[in-house]
Image (cartoon, rainbow, N blue to C red):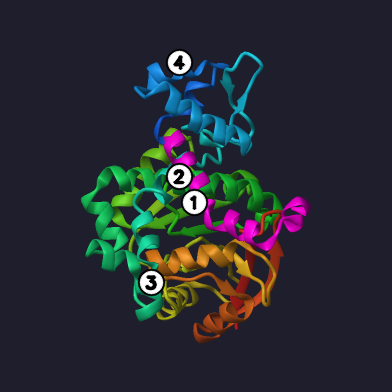
Amino acid sequence: MHEQHQLPPPVQMLNMITGFWTASCIYNAARLNIADLLEDGPKSVERLAKETGTHAPSLYRLLRALAGAGVFTQNEKGEFANTTLSLTLLEDVPGSMKAMAKAQLGDHYKAWGNLKYSLKTGDIAFDHAEGMTIWEYYEKHPDDGLNFMKAMTGLTGAVIAEVVPAYDFSQFKTIVDIGGGNGAFLMAVLNAAPHARGIVFDQEYVVKETQKELIMKDFAARCNVEAGSFFNHVPAGADAYLMKLVLHDWNDMQAMTILTSCSNAMRKDSKLLIVEALIPEGNTPHPGKFMDINMMAMTGGKERTEKEFCELFAYAGLKLSRVIHTHSPVFSILEVIKA
């Protein structure tokens, strides 16, 4: 960072403008499964080219560039190997970013290319570019939809590592994960709260698969699934409700509807634990400020400041009790109670 500040402003700006070059190289390395191919040790570019069906001199240039950025490394024999960064591009590891790389430079990319539409109209760039919402797109392109689910699973791995140690979940006996997907987050929470029982609440087609996961992971005795729409209701009377990266998908009116469903279901002593990025005021750098642009372009949702969250909570008859920050600026825990 110090060296960056010593560069002339035009060079600093050039580095910012061309940031997508690095992202595109990572995307192609992910699509070619390079990290997976290097899992057993270093390989020559000729061997990698043969295994990926690519042009060796061109692949070399790609890997050389990424090695210079710390993604992969080249040894004295000229072979390429994984680094701690490229290990996040492995297929099935906790916190894998492989599917995220494929999504951001794949089905998400056209929305960013049409960002001007959102800026001009306030509407969703993805919907304009594709003629449908992102959720409809995934129904029509199931391979992309499956990859996006994997991307969210990878993100859940990062959430588990940061959030679960930061909060005492053992105080609860019943926990509902709203929009809980494959149940990975709730299962990690239940591990930290051995006397609690849980419910994964999500859409019908999601929880059918979740039930299989719970059985496979030996959680079926402690955790059930329930299908429904959080715009209408959520399971009533639990001690705690979890919502991980849900509200940022939706605009303020939609978020208030979801929160009202939560408020209606909560007891006076229930707690709602919301895991989201919390945007700082002013010029403080924060990854959530660019995540916010992604939500604007993709779903019409947004990342929010503490003040903006509190306004939503007040509408739903809720109030912020406290904020627990984790080691990652992307994940804060907002503890919310009945007003």
Q: Is residue 238 visible?
A: no
Q: Residue at label 2?
A: 24
Magenta residues, dominant SS class: helix
147 is higher (above) or lower (below) than 107: above
183 is higher (above) or lower (below) than 254: above
Decide: marks 2, 3 in contact (CB < 8 A)?
Answer: no
Residue beneath the point at 49% across and 40% down: 26
Three-letter amino acid code at the position of disc 2: Ser
Residue beneath the point at 53% across and 69% down: 303
Q: CA distance from mark 2 to mark 3?
A: 21 Å
Decide: marks 2, 1 in contact (CB < 8 A)?
Answer: yes
Of residues 177 and 99, the one nearer the viewer is: 99
Q: Residue at label 1?
A: 20
Where residue 63 appears, as percent x and y from the top left, is 52, 30
Residue at disc 2, secondary structure: helix
Decide: marks 3, 4 in contact (CB < 8 A)?
Answer: no
Q: Which residues are magenta?
A: 1-30
Q: How many marks?
A: 4
Where residue 50 appears, as percent x and y from the top left, is 38, 16
Q: Residue at label 4?
A: 46
Q: CA distance from mark 3 to mark 4?
A: 42 Å
Where residue 49 appears, as percent x and y from the top left, is 41, 20
Residue at disc 3, secondary structure: helix
Three-letter amino acid code at the position of disc 3: Lys
* Quadrant assignment for the C terminus: bottom right
Numbered tag placed on residue 116 in the rendering: 3
Residue at disc 1, secondary structure: helix
Q: CA distance from mark 1 to mark 3?
A: 17 Å
Q: CA distance from mark 2 to mark 1?
A: 6 Å
Q: Is residue 13 visible?
A: yes
Three-letter amino acid code at the position of disc 4: Glu
Decide: marks 1, 3 in contact (CB < 8 A)?
Answer: no
